[in-house]
RNA sequence: GGGCACUUAGCUCAGUGGUAGAGCGACUCGUUUACACCGAGUAGGUCGGGGGUUCGAUCCCCUCAGUGCCCACCA
């Protein structure tokens, strides 16, 4: 029997073939499992990978974890659905695509929107295919017949219905507020989409009439509408409520001095200029003093250049304007001093690192704290309640705390983006009466209020997270009522810890809103895959590991086992090549255990292995007890999402109990007529059981071995756990 | 500024109220017919410091030190 097995396991000989076998079997589709109707559903919706991103170890990790869960549940007899999909990833993809255009010396700002969209679409479709192939290589046993793309018409329809309902319920509103603006990509960004970096910039002490104030942004002075001081500040007490005369470089201007608690007395001179159009704090100050001071004056445009309101400085970029303004003020003796090394945090676009320009541009917002009109609590409060009541459990508890902390301070969510790659916002505006018309079918041609034909479509698209926040129910609803009723709510959402707020929070809120149910019972969060020195993998460091390269060298099973082996929930995972190699050795060990057993037992030994053989010797008893114990522990650990523990248990047992001890002991036992027949039975039994226990972790090699066993009718993938 | 973690063998990390674990690495021995991608064995940790609770703490509490993460952000 052993002749057909080479002394070394070669993953390349089997993996592709085995995956095809699984796909052909139809068992990835839960409805085609044996006795599907009698099985209790178990659902995981795959976090859709960016259709445009090349496969990285993060994908390998999520596939490994989710595939372990789903294979385990399938073997446990559940109607296990793992629904795959890919994400158009609006802003992310647009950034990548714009970079590509840049290389070709083109720009979206010189293109027609339709032309841009079509090119981006083709670009994404090409890459989408590569991503999906990668998932197959990783062994993902997901149901490809339900594969969904975030821009599928059925999904978009559901997203539109949600928006429409939210509009009617008063949960979305059009707000004219100050927001984060990236001048490179020319779109609004939510707070989550920006980052901070400490910079050293000059702090200018500038004379505003009798008051000297400090600022790092002298070029915004044309947008100033007041000077603010802390009301408790004795130094400026006499000026509060008074008007002072300021030289703006464009002439003299009267400005009011106001008192506001937000001003830090210890900063600079304790006085600040108020520029409501270009600073979030100043915007807030203006809102509190609307009756006293003029409103925002926009002096910077969407491209980051000064506007006509800046007079002779118009057209200059912000940095150029700053230089020029400082020079001119200096000439007029308006600069008292300059602190060259002022350290402060600068807000940047998280993608391109461009300095965020706070701008007032109308955007759509989702309210987080307003109660629903049907009497239910606000979106935020429904999510908080779900966690408190345990309807949704976030693993580990640490993340639950982080989640709740964030929820407490949550702000309304801006959901419109000024980008083209995404789902258009289904709204039209009447140019005559200003009416807002939600038009999800793109049919409206005249204003419902004043019948005017002068209507204009909203040029913006949704924040990707607004649509992906509906993913768990949208994917299932898109396939019809039956799928939704059978497979929703889902059991587990397994995803990266860094999108807890971006995605998980929104899914919980939107799911309660739209379906009245939690989207999933458990959230399992994984960390980042790092290199062996715990360094983040990045292109610039050159330490990025390509999963397909690893698979070429060591096989998918080795990669999967290495990833899961020392991974506790939520922790980052340092992955060294040594570890992957070690796991390849383990896979090979299993292969050779098989060779040994197959060469020593007979086909009939496999036919009666449904019940455990009786031990005849002490070592027999020990190994059979050990098997029972390890089976219990592995099961227990899998039930509790302790994948690394489960992997370590089975590893220990297979290598150090079965191989090192029992197989050695079996050699003399096989020579002895009294024990030989029973030992053969036990060996055959053990082999089958460990293949079952290992299958979720190392699906390829176990299935490959399973096929070599005599009297096998079924695929291992549906063998009973 | 607010919050949350972590500190265990040379390295990377698990783990538990009751004589400390894995992987990799190191050392010694072994040409045993499943595997040298192997086997047998050895060394190596007062589980960050200090204090407390307890019959007993690496595990619980307090405190100090170091590291990391999240959130907010001052012009």
Image: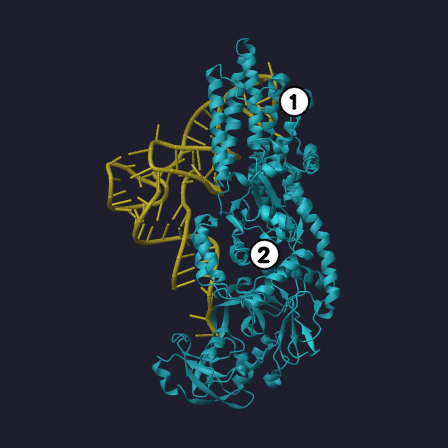
Chain colours: A cyan, B yellow
Measured as percent of width and height from the top left, residue A36 is found at 62, 37
Query: In terms of secondary structure, where does tag 1 sit?
Result: loop
- Label 2 to label 1: alpha-carbon separation: 47 Å
Check if mark 2 and mark 1 are on a common chain: yes
Tell whether A121 sits left or right of B75: right
How far from the left and from the top, in percent, is residue A105? Answer: 73, 65
Q: Is residue A357 above or below residue A552?
A: below
Quarter occupied by residue A77: top right
Q: Which mark is residue A672?
A: none
> Chain for mark 1?
A
Q: Secondary structure at mark 2?
A: loop
| Picture quarter with the N terminus of chain A | top right
In this rendered view, identify the residue nearer to me: A387 or A190. A387
Q: Position of residue A433 (x, y in %)?
A: 63, 80
Of residue A146 and residue A191, the one placed in the foreground of this image is: A146
Circle nearer the N terminus (2, 1): 2
Q: Which residue is mark 2?
A: A470
């Amino acid at each position: 029997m052993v002749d057909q097995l080479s002394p070394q396991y070669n993953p390349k000989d089997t993996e592709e073939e085995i995956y095809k076998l699984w796909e052909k079997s139809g068992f990835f589709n839960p409805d085609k499992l044996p006795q599907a109707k009698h099985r209790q559903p178990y659902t995981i919706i795959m976090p859709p990978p960016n259709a445009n991103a090349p496969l990285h170890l993060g994908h390998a990790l999520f596939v490994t974890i989710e595939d372990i869960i789903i294979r385990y549940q399938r073997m446990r007899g559940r109607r296990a659905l793992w629904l795959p999909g890919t994400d158009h990833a609006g802003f992310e993809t647009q950034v990548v695509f714009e970079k590509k255009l840049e290389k070709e010396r083109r720009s979206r700002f010189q293109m027609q929107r339709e032309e841009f969209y079509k090119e981006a679409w083709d670009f994404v479709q090409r890459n989408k295919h590569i991503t999906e192939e990668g998932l197959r290589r990783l062994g993902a046993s997901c149901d490809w017949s339900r594969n969904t793309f975030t821009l599928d018409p059925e999904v978009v329809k559901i997203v539109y219905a949600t928006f429409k309902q939210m509009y009617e319920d008063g949960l979305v509103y059009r707000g004219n507020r100050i927001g984060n603006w990236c001048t490179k990509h020319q779109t609004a960004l939510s707070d989550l989409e920006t980052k901070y970096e400490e910079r050293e910039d000059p702090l200018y002490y500038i004379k505003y009439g009798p008051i000297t104030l400090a600022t790092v942004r002298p070029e915004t002075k044309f947008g100033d509408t007041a000077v603010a001081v802390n009301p408790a500040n004795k130094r400026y007490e006499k000026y509060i409520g008074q008007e002072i005369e300021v030289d703006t470089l464009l002439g003299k201007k009267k400005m009011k001095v106001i008192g506001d608690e937000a001003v830090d007395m210890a900063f600079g001179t304790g006085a600040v200029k108020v520029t409501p159009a270009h600073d979030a704090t100043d915007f807030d100050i203006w809102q509190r003093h609307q009756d006293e001071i003029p409103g925002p004056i926009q002096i910077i445009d969407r491209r980051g250049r000064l506007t006509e309101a800046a007079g002779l400085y118009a057209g200059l970029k912000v940095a150029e304007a700053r230089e020029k303004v400082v020079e001119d003020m200096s000439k007029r003796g308006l600069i008292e001093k300059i602190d060259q090394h002022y350290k402060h945090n600068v807000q940047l676009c998280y993608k391109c690192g461009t300095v965020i320009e706070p701008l007032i541009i109308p955007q759509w917002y989702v309210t987080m704290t307003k109660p629903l009109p049907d009497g239910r609590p606000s979106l935020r409060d429904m999510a908080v309640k779900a966690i408190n009541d345990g309807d949704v459990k976030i693993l580990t508890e640490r993340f639950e705390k982080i989640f709740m902390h964030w929820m407490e301070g949550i702000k309304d969510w801006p959901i419109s983006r000024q980008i083209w790659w995404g789902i258009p916002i289904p709204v039209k505006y009447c140019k005559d009466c200003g009416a807002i018309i939600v038009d999800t079918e793109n049919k409206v041609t005249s204003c419902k209020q004043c019948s005017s034909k002068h209507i204009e479509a909203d040029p913006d698209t949704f924040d990707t997270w607004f649509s992906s926040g509906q993913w768990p129910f949208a994917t299932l609803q898109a396939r019809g009522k039956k799928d939704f009723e059978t497979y929703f709510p889902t059991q587990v959402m397994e995803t990266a810890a860094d999108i807890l707020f971006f995605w998980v929070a929104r899914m919980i809120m939107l799911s309660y809103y739209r379906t009245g149910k939690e989207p999933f019972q458990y959230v399992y969060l994984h960390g980042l895959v790092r290199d062996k020195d715990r360094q983040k993998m990045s292109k610039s460091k050159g330490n990025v590991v390509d999963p397909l390269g690893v698979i070429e060298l060591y096989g998918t099973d080795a990669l999967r086992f290495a990833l899961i082996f020392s991974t506790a929930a939520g922790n980052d995972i340092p992955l060294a090549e040594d570890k992957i190699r070690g796991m390849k050795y383990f896979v090979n060990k299993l292969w050779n255990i098989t060779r040994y057993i197959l060469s020593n037992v007979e086909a009939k030994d496999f036919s009666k292995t449904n019940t455990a053989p009786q031990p005849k010797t002490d070592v027999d008893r020990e190994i059979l007890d050990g098997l029972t114990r390890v089976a219990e522990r592995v099961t227990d650990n899998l039930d509790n999402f302790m994948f690394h523990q489960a992997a370590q248990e089975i590893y220990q047992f297979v290598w150090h109990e079965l191989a090192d001890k029992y197989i050695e002991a079996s050699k003399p036992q096989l020579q002895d007529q009294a024990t030989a027949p029973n030992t053969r039975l036990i060996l055959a039994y053990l082999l089958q059981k460990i293949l079952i226990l290992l299958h979720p972790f190392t699906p390829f090699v176990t299935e490959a071995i399973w096929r070599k066993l005599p009297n096998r009718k079924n695929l291992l993938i549906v063998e009973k756990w």
